[in-house]
Image (cartoon, helix red, strand yellow):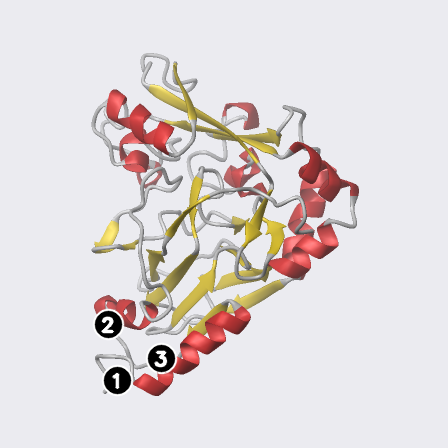
Amino acid sequence: APDAVPPHELVERMEEMFHDQGVVRLTNTGLAKVEDMKRYANVVVKEQMRYEGGANPREGIIANVYEVGAPHDAWLHYHHEMAYNQHSMKNLAFCSVKAPWGKGDTYLSENVSVTEELMKTDLGRKLKDHGVCYIRCLTDREAYKGQGWKEGRAVYNHWQLSFGAETPDEAVAKAHECGLETEWCTDPLLEESSRYLKTIMRADAFEFCPSLGRNVLFSSVADHNMWFDTWKGVADVPPEKRPLQMTFGDGSPISTEEIRQWVSLYDRSGIRVRWQTGDVVAFCNYRFAHGRPAFELRQWEERTIGVMLGEKFQRVGAHADAW
């Protein structure tokens, strides 16, 4: 049986690997309970933040371990967790609770090489000069009677779930804590609802990574309306009415060609994580983006990945002297 507490030698190896590479993976662990996996992940993900102001409708598995919060048939493009807020997290961990072989594998993209290749292009220079603008629109849980994409509704996330709020005032206060501008609008798909929360944030496309002493890319197409091209319920919504919109920071559109280029750069640095039950992967949110392709499960198959969010940090953007 695996040790309930990570042995000293393993702790040292994990810390060294994480320091040097920004990622560590445990496999063939024999761990079956998410509580035990969390204990191992906590070796490197030492502090955890609460999921407030997040995009996906995550439910808790146990305290501070969340579900992925996205449909299996949605293609999750590479992204840095919570890049669309004024605060993000330094690191995060995934715990494989249930894993059918070869289905729903996670991919990590090594971000230093992505940044270096991007900065050779016009797209990289535009992102450096203009930054990005994130527009997220959140539906009202009451208007949808608690239903979401799992019930086939054209819903991404309700503001009550995103912000852990029960009243509009509370949601706005929490959005402002995340550095977001807010506006209450009419829901374009449910006109009787006027509690449709639009949030806006202009941000640097890059972030200074303290452990590397350099700037790295900290934005991706995961916040563009194309995120929903394969998302159950929302894929049929016209792109301009989808709950996520993204432009350059000056409001100019990101062209289809630029999106392809961006996706391709992350793909080229991708590393596949083939899940087995009991696996734990912890990684630096600056040094790695993460995502996964869509997948299908048979009736008897289950995939459960527990997500642990690491220590919160306030975004500072790029440093002028750290290119």
Instruction: Confirm whether residue 28 shows in the render.
Output: no
Residue drawn at 66 percent across, 56 percent down: 114
Q: What residue sits 24% from the left and 72% below the top?
A: 36
11 vs 240: above or below: below
Rendered view: 317 above or below 278: above
Nearest the camera: 237 or 76? 76
Label placed on residue 36: 2
Which of the two discs, 3 and 1, sits closer to the camera? Answer: 3
Residue 150, compared with residue 37, is above or below; it is: above
The amino acid type found where label 1 is placed reads: Pro
Q: CA distance from mark 2 to mark 1?
A: 9 Å
Which residue is disc 3 drawn over? 11
- The quadrant holding residue 55 is top left
* Residue at which label 1 appears: 2
Taking the image as shown, residue 38 lies to the left or right of residue 285, namely left
Counting residues from the N terminus, which is met first, the one under dot 3 or under dot 1?
1
Which quadrant of the figure contains the N terminus?
bottom left
* Of callouts 2 and 1, the N-terminal one: 1
Which percent across, then down, holds residue 98? 32, 67
Q: Is residue 20 visible?
A: yes
Describe residue 250's horizontal placement relative to residue 174 as left or right: right
Q: CA distance from mark 3 to mark 1?
A: 14 Å
